[in-house]
Image (cartoon, rainbow, N blue to C red):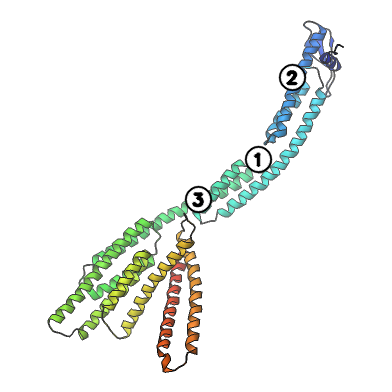
Amino acid sequence: MEHPDHPLTEARRYGYVEDGGVWLRPTLGQPARRIGQVKDTDDDALRYFARRYEAFRAKVEELLARLATAENQGSYLMKILHLQEQTKQHDGLGDYESLNRRLHEAEDGLKVSVTRNREKNLATKTSLIEQAEELADSEDWIVASEKVKELRQAWLKTGPVDKELTESLENRFHSAVQLFFDRRKAFQVDRKTLARRTVERYRDLVQQAESLKNSDQFEQTSRQLKLLQNAWREVNGNLPKKQAAELWTKFRAANNHFFERLKNHIESQRVAAAREGRSTVPSSAEESLVRKRELANRAEALLGTPSNQAVTQAKALQAEWKQSGAVRGPESDRLWQRFMLACDKVFEMSALDYYLRKRQAEGTTMTTNERAVAATTALRKFIESDKQELETLRDNLEKLSPAAANDQFRQLLQGKIRTFERKIQTKTELIAIFSATAAA
């Protein structure tokens, strides 16, 4: 059985031939219009324009298929609108009303999707703006800078919102980002200025120490160097590690040079007195005090030295103290308290550094402020432990029988109590130092 001529049949449904022309029947609210002319036979002409319609329909089908799987559907809206217009102007014979209806349905669905996406985009951009505005006041420059960069990338990847909101949202976001970077730039300028002033202050102290290191006015110079050491600690500058180490090395070298000369001076006087047969006890009392002051000054200066070096030097100073001679009196007692407290700070700082290193994540570094906060927290924890131990010792001492047989154990307990009291005092003073650093 012969198949009917389907293209010709469809062509006759939607068009006809009249006066040598091919006409499209009324459709889409438009009157019949001439779309071409007959060149060979009427049927050939009708088939030709039926094939033109099929080609156009295939184009519409392809677009709708791509739309169904597209991620960014909003970009298809103008193409759909363009094809809708073409359904009213295209020269072919076929069911343009059906194509136009499908394109309108796709448009409606697309508008719903675009509206939904723009609402999501608005929520995302609002969140990004709020985060950027929060970071605008941050002073954690490294972490905040990375976060701001992430926000900028997220902003670029977020799709559009309604046009009437676009400008205001863009202005809010970029204003917050710009405010952060402006503040960071101002901070960096201030930090460079502060660093320059800090370097100048340290260099001035180094110069003063070097001008005094060869002085023969040992008593007066010892006091002057003590004041310079206090001034050095009060600067509390946050410089690059290498630069800070270089300045400290010069300052410490000048101090060590003088105090080594002082030690040699005291020793030479002792030897001379022994050679002349003079008793050194009465005349060496002041010399012993001078030497003890020098040792106390050197011990207090160790707090700015790296822990491993400071511990070694503190032990050496303790050995020198034992050889500095016995002196009685209030000043000697005060010097002993200063010296022991300074050494205790060195040992406590070494233990604290070890504790912080063990708990620091591998491959990370702490800022000066972060380290100060972590150190303060750790020291408070240690003080609580020391107080519990001290309370136990005091309780044991109160319960100890006053019998003479317990005298040695009583002295041992009293010594331990004094040790823990000094430990608590040492940690408390270190907390004050770190708290000042964190607040700076």
Pick out the residue farthest to the bottom: 403
Q: Amino acid at mark 1?
A: Pro
Q: Position of residue 351 (x, y in %)?
A: 42, 68
**Mark 1 and mark 3: span between their CA atoms?**
27 Å
Image marks 2 and 1: residues in contact by CB distance under 8 Å: no
Q: Amino acid at mark 3?
A: Asp
- Of pointers 1 and 3, the one earlier in the residue sequence: 1
Q: Quadrant of residue 81?
A: top right
Q: Is residue 393 left or right of residue 337?
A: right
Nearer-the-camera pick, 73 or 325: 325
Q: Disc number at residue 2?
A: none
Residue tagged by mark 1? Answer: 160
Q: Write the residue at 21% across / 67% down.
A: 214
Residue tagged by mark 2? Answer: 55
Mark 3: few, some, or many residues within 10 Å (few <14, many ≥20)?
few
Q: Write the residue at 27% across / 67% down.
A: 255
Q: Is residue 377 above or below residue 78?
A: below
Q: Is residue 29 above or below residue 259?
A: above
Nearer-the-camera pick, 202 or 168: 202
Q: Disc number at residue 182?
A: 3
Image depth: mark 2 or mark 1 in front: 2
Mark 2: few, some, or many residues within 10 Å (few <14, many ≥20)?
few
**Mark 2 and mark 3: span between their CA atoms?**
59 Å
